[in-house]
Amino acid sequence: MKKIVGLILGLLISQVSFAQQTISSLAEFIALQDGSNQNIKMAPGTYHISSETKSLFPGGNWRVNEEGNWPGLLQFSGNNNIFDLTGVTFTFDSTILLEMPSIAHGKLVQLGGSGNVWKGFNLQERPNNGEYGYFHHTSGGAILEVTGANHEFYDLTLKSRFSRPYGLGSIYGKTGSSTGKLPGSSLNKKSGLSINVLDNTYFENTNVDHSGLGHPLVFNGPINNLVFDTVSVIAETRSTNDLIANGVGGTDRNGVPFHVTYNGVEMTGESGKADYLSLFDTHNLNRCQNLDSGNQNAPIKPNFQYSLVEDSFRGYNQGQIGTIEVYNATVVGARSGIALEYASEGMIVDGMTVTGIAGHGVPACGGWNGSNGGEGDSTAYGPPSYSVLKNVRADAAYSTIMEINGNSQDIIADIELLDPSNGYNRPTDSTALALLGGDNHKLRIWKRDNKALTKDLIIKVNNGGTDNLLLCNMTQQPVYVSNNVSNSMIYSVGNIDNDSSSSANNTIVKLSSSTNEPDVCKALASSDNPYTNCNGFDAFSGIEAEGFCDMSGVEIEYSADDGGEQIGYINNGEWLEFKDVNFGDGAASFDARISSKTDGGDIELRLGSPTGSLIGTCSVSGTGSWTVYDTVSCDINSVSGVQDLYLVFTGNNGYLMNINWFKFTEAEDNCYLPWSGDDFSVEKETVNYSSGSIDISCASSVEISMDLEGVGSMEDADYLNVYYTVDGGAQQVISENVNAFAEKTVSVSGIRGSNVEIFANVYTSYAAEVYTISNISVVSEPEVAYSLDVVSIVASADDGNVPANTRDGSLDTRWSAKGDSHWIAYDLGSNKTVEEVGIAFFRGDQRTAAVSIETSTDNTNWETVYTGEQSSSTIAVQTFDVTDSNARYVRIVGYGNSSNTWNSFTEVELIGR
């Protein structure tokens, strides 16, 4: 996250504070386009642009009609402005595009200038009485363009709708003139967000919802130093079977196509349908022409998916595209997730999920009708040389997960392979999972459940020549190594088809399972976990035993129980780890599916480590055969929240058992607060009272209270003592009394735990000496923030001043590390609500220090909840009000101080609930 923080701090320093002006009309907003040094707050609401609002614009006309050049609607060109549009939505009638001229490379709105801050810019295209407009010129255009330098965008939203035609995609060419096309048809492109000639700009929470033949998000160089933190791109694909079945008709987004001109007649219904559909002959697969020019009479081939849009993260003038960083992105349904393979500098991508990617489906020679089934047409990830991709995911429902051409070099990637949510729809000959070429790459592909895909897809290492490749295929999918691969190391769990020459100097190793992953591959993993980035198990759903996060000694093997995989070859003392198992409000019992030809053994259930807290032991008896299965069950001690679970196997020598899956059963909710006890009195007797165990697990904290009274001629031998315990621990005093006393109320608050029990020991010597206990209650208290416990502390580095010093209660000790972006992280043991972080800085009264604070539930995916500087006034703990977040892990990242690059904290306190 280094660049994000540095970029924000740099931009903030450059901003000048101006008095805020509030506006509440579209006319006022239009008047601000050329201004600089403005601080604008617009009243929330929806502001609609239609032909009727044209009079609000200079000259009473659309800008492009007055100026003779794009943009068509708005052009913000001023500098150093702040536009706070939180809660504002700009909508426009799509048909206003039809009122603009046929000029190449259109754009409707342009946000330019330098040093501007945009908060909440939301632009949405809407139909006008069901009709959609388009850019007249066949080169098309973009709805929104961002240009200039040194901007910040927060909560940018764009909804762009439909090209002409829509529903056909680029199945018969991309434009009406530059490539081959359907006879008499005109295709007009419409892109969403265009990033054009832009430098040093930060985007946070960008949302593009795009339906149109054009790029949802496109870059046109020169481009450099852009950061996207949290991006969502939503596009759309369609099956050719649906296209064939629906024909021409219709005027909505599902019509095929939308407003096609055929031989001079615009067709929106049945007119000319038979002649038009004759061009889509699905039975004559030999009518294939070259796409370079001329009309395309090729048929639509059934049974594949194609995208109705073009690429996301697409680049033009890529030789002028520099550094782009992307964090926490999602792309659905585009033609590619990233298509920047020729950019001049590498990307940094940390956290990205790409699903439903499909090709443009051109059925011409060499395309989908070709022998390769259209491979190379689209992919989830097509990064440039020198890129680093971490925590990225993709499915292969309709296309490949990665394509690297033979000219690329030095790409590092760790990709999680996902199962598609809606199955596969690919031509028979489209068999590539990935197409890999180029030199000096380090690539790791893995799958969370370690199971094979339901479609036979192959990792093909042959894309234009490959040298010095490290490929770690931790999936069950096969790898094909062509004869132009050299000096490479390839490790694969899936089968390997090796056509490389014996003189190629390759090291090719078939692994028995992902648990045998070599260290050189583990080093590529996006997290510290050496096997998978596994976390986040639901305790009450079936957990596959082979889906562990770490293990000792065991092996994955075939399961005769369900035909999948299981854990076998288990010896005494071996174990499985499952990180972040969510037990919710509590678990009561444990079930496991096992088999054993021997006498079995025990499964110990422990928290935190193989020797951690024991919550239950499940005894396993022999089933008579390794292929005969039984489900064993056992009760466990109370456990709730998110925990790291260890299954530890114990027993005699030899193999103990196989385990296929396990799950927990939820505990019944016995927490009913407020709780009240019966009143009672003691006269001339000894009474030892117990309330029994009271479940308080549903409250963050509780208060115990009651009224006590002692009347009569008592002496010091008479007593009334009241105590309580928490979770079976030592007794703690509520009230201890001797002799008589007036009625009083006693209470204890701030009690936290799962169960409490109240005890009273009471004695009076004679009649008419009476102790009374009444109004006994246990009530939940309002949640209040408190200092959170920390179970472990780690840091990226230290100079001998260790991380533990930040929790020893002393301002005379410290943790220190020299250099930008060093961090210290705290494990809370389970998820808490983190509200504040207190930091005492070494020499904090002499200098300032820049930090960011991040939280995570899984120690892998981090959310920044604070960025800023500490004051130079004190060495005491300074409290930072962070964005409230549900988290188990808290990480403080340091960026040096105003005197040097040291990061030094003496004490750290975490506040929450």
Image: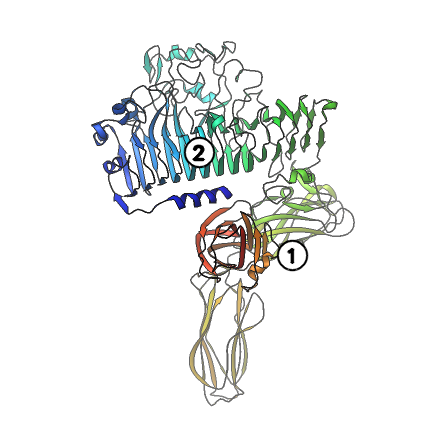
Scheme by which the image is coloured = rainbow
Task: Identify the image quadrant of residue 262.
Answer: top left
**Type of amino acid at the residue the image marks with label 2:** Val
| 10 Å crowding of disc 1: few (<14), some (14-19), many (20+) | few
Query: Vertically, is 486 above or below 868?
Result: above
| 813 left or right of 195 in image | right
| 10 Å crowding of disc 2: few (<14), some (14-19), many (20+) | many
Query: Vertically, is 735 above or below 494?
Result: below
The image position of residue 271, as x and y in percent, is 33, 13
| Front residue (pair 74, 548) | 74
| 258 left or right of 727 in image | left
N-terminal label among 1 and 2: 2
- The reply to whether residue 456 is in sight is no
| 204 left or right of 823 in image | left
Please report the residue visible at 40 percent of the width from the left and 33 percent of the height from the top: 209
Question: Which of the numbered marks, if any, corresponds to residue 96?
Answer: none
- The reply to whether residue 793 is in sight is yes
Please report the residue visible at 62 percent of the width from the left and 25 percent of the height from the top: 460
Question: Which of the numbered marks, if any, corresponds to residue 233?
Answer: 2
Q: Which residue is mark 1?
A: 612
